[in-house]
Amino acid sequence: MATKTIIHSLIFLFMCLSLHSFRLARAQSFIGVNYGEVADNLPPPTETVKLLQSTTIQKVRLYGADPAIIKALANTNIGIVIGAGNGDIPALASDPNFAGQWVSTNVLAYYPGSKIIVVTVGNEVMTSKDQGLISQILPAMQNLQNALNAASLGGKIKVSTVHSMAVLTQSDPPSSGAFNPSFGDTMRAMLAFMRATGSPFMINPYPFFAYTSDTRAETLAFCLFQPNAGRVDSGTGIKYMNMFDAQVDAIRSALNAMGFKDIEIVVAETGWPYKGDPNEVGPSIDNAKAYNGNLINHLRSMVGTPLMPGKSVDTYIFALYNEDLKPGPGSERSFGLFNSDLSLTYDAGLSKSSQTPTTPSSPVVTPSPKPSGGGWCVPKAGVSDDQLQANLDYACGHGVDCSSIQPGAACFEPNTVACHAAFAMNLLYQTSGRNPWNCDFSQTATLTSTNPSYNGCIYPGGSTPSDRLVGQELTKNALTAGAPPNNLYNLLTYMYMFMFMFVNIVFMPQLL
């Protein structure tokens, strides 16, 4: 009897640990960073690797194929994107032997110890106006793919190229997204290559640049994932709550319009500068922290975009370090998440010790240190109903489970915008890291140590034993709310729950 009890306990423990490990691994596998080298003050690659291992970053994109960096990343399980520069394209396109030598030198010399996952050919070539390079980009990709195939790596390492948002002639509204018709057959042939090889379409969306051309306060909030009224796509009726989703979905629409609905999208670059020249509008530490921090939370939520729900697009944040030798305005040299001395420029929530992964499929509140302002996030006094409605739309549109404020649910009454917004704002705060900036809502919210729960309506938060009940309630709500069938995490969650129930039903009676 004792042996059976031990065995069943071990089975249960294994299932719990396996699910927890999978949650942590999957929750971060889509977050990467760009590792640029246009600088004269960067730390040694070995120190950078130690830094990366202290974060939840699981992928690194290089603009070249620096041997020192690739070697330093060996045996870390960090995915590596390496690049063939624009200057390599003519030789790669015209000489298959050159492509073979390139693969031998930059891939075979390090793989599989160094986990190379993608080779990019050129950067923003299609919008460079260099007709020679544009005509050579696809042959270069094909020759590299053939070289990888010859080395039996064709199914393991993908070949792609990176585009700017200018590859679109139309992006607003997102449903009207369309590629520049001047690319003609070149773009179609490239997409056919990507479909045949399973390669991603890589894009550089920058809400920062969208804001610099429209500096209204509501545009800034839309770009920073902050509370805003949203923007309705006139073609679909979908309300977009942030610029990132709108830009990515514009690419999705363009791909769909050309008949390539099956090609995955990868965000090769996105970021926000933390400082710039005096005449630049937008760069600041607060804005950079808000954009990157909220982007990371948005990706972790697994809510996806309106046209690609239930999954997060692989995203590489620009950039790991500042690059002090880059030309252009000051902002170009100020995108770094870290300084050259390895210290944080600001905390975007990437440290393993500073965040807890969350997903909308299981938004269980994990107890964390009580923030200085209190344990619950609530609206400030005097906030207008219009602003509260915007906060409500923002929170419910970013992955939190708002079923508790639906008709008949525990928190529906009183049926007021103020009460519903308060519950949703607090729930988003609790599931986004419980950092002070998660309770900002364009300066319309505040932290309190007074529990706002009432009757049967329980607000998660604080550090009381009732948190355990809140976690159970949130889990129940998440499991009854339904989940996208293409969300692998949800599938495994249900599988483990079924296994646990099976063990209890079949074996527990024998132990009684």
Image (tube, helix red, strand yellow):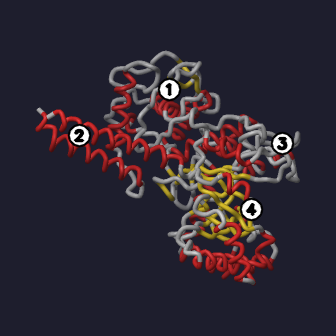
Query: Does residue 481 appear to the left or right of 166 in the view shown?
Result: left
Q: Which residue is mark 2?
A: 7
- Which residue is at a point 59% across and 58% down the rendered structure image? 113
Residues at marks 1 and 2, CA–CA distance in whole angstroms: 33 Å
Disc 3 to disc 4: CB gap under 8 Å: no
Q: Which residue is mark 1?
A: 368
Q: Which quadrant is the C terminus positioned in?
A: top left
Q: Which one is earlier in the sequence, the residue at label 1 or at label 2?
A: 2
Mark 1 vs mark 2, foreground winner is: 2
Mark 1 vs mark 4, foreground winner is: 4
Residues at marks 2 and 4, CA–CA distance in whole angstroms: 52 Å
Disc 1 to disc 4: CB gap under 8 Å: no
Query: Does residue 155 appear to the left or right of 201 in the view shown?
Result: left
**Residue 163 appears at what percent x and percent y?**
70, 65
Mark 3 vs mark 4, foreground winner is: 4
Determine the image quadrant of residue 348: top right
Label number found at residue 486 = none
Mark 3: secondary structure: loop
Q: Amino acid at mark 4?
A: Gly
- Which residue is at a point 80% across and 78% down the rendered structure image? 131
Determine the image quadrant of residue 162: bottom right
- What is the crowding at mark 2: few (fewer than 14 residues within 10 Å), some, or many (at least 20)? few
- Which residue is at a point 70% across and 48% down the rendered structure image? 271
Residues at marks 3 and 4, CA–CA distance in whole angstroms: 26 Å
Mark 2 vs mark 4, foreground winner is: 2
Q: Which residue is mark 3?
A: 276
Label number found at residue 64 = 4
